[in-house]
C-alpha cells in the first residue's frame, strides 16, 4: 500500500484532490495518467516547453531518432527539417517509471482543428528538486530525505505529517521535521517505503510541486546511468536482496520510421509521435518562429555563446562557451549544427542554434589549426 504510516481504518486509496483529473480514482496498471502542463514542465528537466497544439512547427528527423531506445541505422535516417502543423498535444506520465512524456499529432493541413489536454495556469506553482544521495536511497537502514531551506516555499512546515500525491493519483504520507539554522526539511517515516516502491537509486531526483491550492505533488526524474537502469529491491520473500531492472521508456523505432516516411512523402494525412524529456535530448518538434529567429544569426566559428542549464539542486545557471565548428550537416538541417566547447568543463557538445544564444558581440580568435568542420 502507498500509505505509510496510516491507521487501519484509513488503509484505503484516496483520490487525489487536485486539478489533475479531479475526482478520478487511482489509475489502473498500464494506464498513462494525464498531467497538468505546469507540473509536466517542472518534471521535464531543463527542456524548453513543448509547443502547444495549433503551433506551426519544424519536425527534426535526427532529434526523433535520438529518442529511440535502439537507434535505427544511420543510413536509414534522412536528415531534414520538415515544416508542419501541431494538431494535438497530450501530456502524460508513464504508469511504471512515472516519466513524463508528450504524445502529439502532426499534419500539413494548417486548417485542421486542434486538440489538447485541458491544462491550468502555471501561476502559483512552486517546485523544489532534490537529487538523491546514496544514503537517501539506502534500504538497509532507516533512510530519510533532507531538503534545503528553500523547500519551505513548497512544503510549508505545519508541524504535522506531510501528505503528497504522485502522478498515479496515490497519496503518500511522510513525517515532516524541520531542524537547524538555516532550517533543513527532513522527511523521515514513510520515506524508505516511498524509495522502495518507486525503485529510486542514487542519482535519481525527486521533484515536489505545490499548486495554487496548496496541494503538493511529487514526481521522479530517473538518472541516465547504464541506459537509465533503475533497481527495484524485493525484500519480502527473504532477507537477501533480490534485484530487478527496469529501463526508462523511449520512443519506438517503428514510430520514428513511420514519421520519417510521412515527412518524406510530403506529409499526407496525419502522423503521431512521442517525446520523452531528458537533459541530453532536446525537443525535436520546435516552433517555426523559434527556429527561424535562431537561423537569422550569423553563426561563426569562435562566436561566444551561452546556455541556461539546470543543476542537480534545481537551480539554473548560465554556461558560457565558444563555437568551435559548424557541422557540415547544417547544409541539410540545423539540428545540432554547432560544436561548442564549454568554459568550465572544457567538454565539447553539439548544440541546436535555438538552444543557445550569443552573449558577446566580440568573436574569439581561434588558432587556424583549431578551426575545422566536424567530420
Image: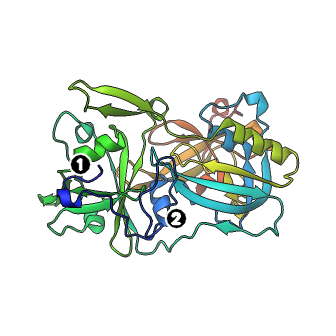
The residue lying toward the viewer, choosing from 325 and 51, is: 51
**Image coords of residue 16 (percent x, y):** 37, 65
Residue beneath disc 1 = 191
| SS category of the residue bearing label 2 | helix
Quarter of the figure with residue 181: bottom left
Find residue 37 and name its label. Answer: 2
Residue 261 seen in the figure = yes
The answer to whether residue 254 is left or right of residue 212 is: right
The residue lying toward the viewer, choosing from 85 and 94, is: 94
Q: Is residue 266 placed above or below 212 in the rendered structure?
A: above
Q: Residues within 10 Å of mark 1 (few under 14, many from 20)?
A: many
Taking the view exactly as shown, the residue that stands out farthest to the top is 240
The residue positioned 15% from the left and 58% from the top of the image is 177
**Image coords of residue 56 (percent x, y):** 75, 64
Residue 336 seen in the figure = no
**Image coords of residue 368 (percent x, y):** 67, 33
Task: Give the foreground label among 2 and 1.
Answer: 1
The residue positioned 46% from the left and 35% from the top of the image is 228
The residue positioned 19% from the left and 42% from the top of the image is 143
Amino acid at each position: 500500500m502507498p500509505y505509510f504510516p496510516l491507521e487501519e481504518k484509513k488503509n484505503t486509496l484516496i483520490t487525489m484532490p487536485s486539478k489533475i483529473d479531479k475526482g478520478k480514482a487511482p489509475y489502473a496498471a498500464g494506464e498513462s495518467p494525464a498531467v497538468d502542463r505546469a507540473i509536466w514542465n517542472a518534471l521535464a528537466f531543463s527542456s524548453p516547453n513543448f509547443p502547444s497544439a495549433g503551433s506551426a512547427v519544424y519536425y527534426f528527423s535526427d532529434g526523433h531518432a535520438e529518442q529511440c531506445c535502439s537507434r535505427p541505422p544511420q543510413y536509414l535516417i534522412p536528415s531534414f527539417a520538415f515544416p508542419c502543423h501541431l494538431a494535438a498535444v497530450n501530456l502524460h506520465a508513464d504508469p511504471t517509471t512515472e516519466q513524463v512524456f508528450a504524445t502529439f499529432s502532426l499534419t500539413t493541413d494548417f486548417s485542421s482543428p486542434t486538440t489538447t489536454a485541458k491544462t491550468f495556469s502555471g501561476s502559483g506553482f512552486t517546485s523544489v528538486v532534490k537529487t538523491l544521495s546514496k544514503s537517501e536511497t539506502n534500504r538497509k537502514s532507516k533512510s530519510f530525505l533532507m531538503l534545503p531551506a528553500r523547500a519551505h516555499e513548497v512544503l510549508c512546515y505545519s508541524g504535522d505529517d506531510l501528505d503528497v500525491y504522485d502522478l498515479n493519483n496515490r497519496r503518500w504520507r511522510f513525517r515532516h521535521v524541520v531542524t537547524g539554522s538555516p532550517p533543513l526539511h527532513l522527511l523521515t517515516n514513510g520515506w524508505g517505503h516511498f524509495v522502495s516502491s518507486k525503485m529510486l537509486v542514487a542519482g535519481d531526483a525527486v521533484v515536489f510541486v505545490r499548486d495554487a491550492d496548496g496541494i503538493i505533488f511529487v514526481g521522479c526524474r530517473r538518472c541516465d546511468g547504464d541506459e537509465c537502469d533503475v533497481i527495484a529491491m524485493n525484500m519480502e520473500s527473504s532477507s537477501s536482496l533480490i534485484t530487478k531492472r527496469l529501463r526508462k521508456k523511449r520512443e519506438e523505432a517503428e514510430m520514428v520510421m513511420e514519421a520519417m516516411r510521412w515527412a518524406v512523402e510530403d506529409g499526407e494525412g496525419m502522423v503521431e509521435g512521442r517525446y520523452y524529456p531528458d537533459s541530453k535530448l532536446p525537443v525535436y518538434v520546435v516552433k517555426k518562429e523559434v527556429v527561424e529567429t535562431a537561423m537569422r544569426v550569423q553563426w561563426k566559428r569562435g562566436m561566444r555563446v551561452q546556455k541556461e542549464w539546470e543543476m542537480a539542486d534545481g537551480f539554473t545557471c548560465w554556461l558560457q562557451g565558444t563555437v568551435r565548428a559548424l557541422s557540415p550537416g547544417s547544409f541539410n538541417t540545423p539540428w545540432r549544427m554547432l560544436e561548442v566547447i564549454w568554459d568550465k568543463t572544457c567538454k565539447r557538445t553539439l548544440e541546436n542554434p535555438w538552444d543557445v544564444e550569443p552573449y558577446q558581440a566580440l568573436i574569439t580568435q581561434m588558432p587556424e589549426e583549431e578551426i575545422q568542420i566536424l567530420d
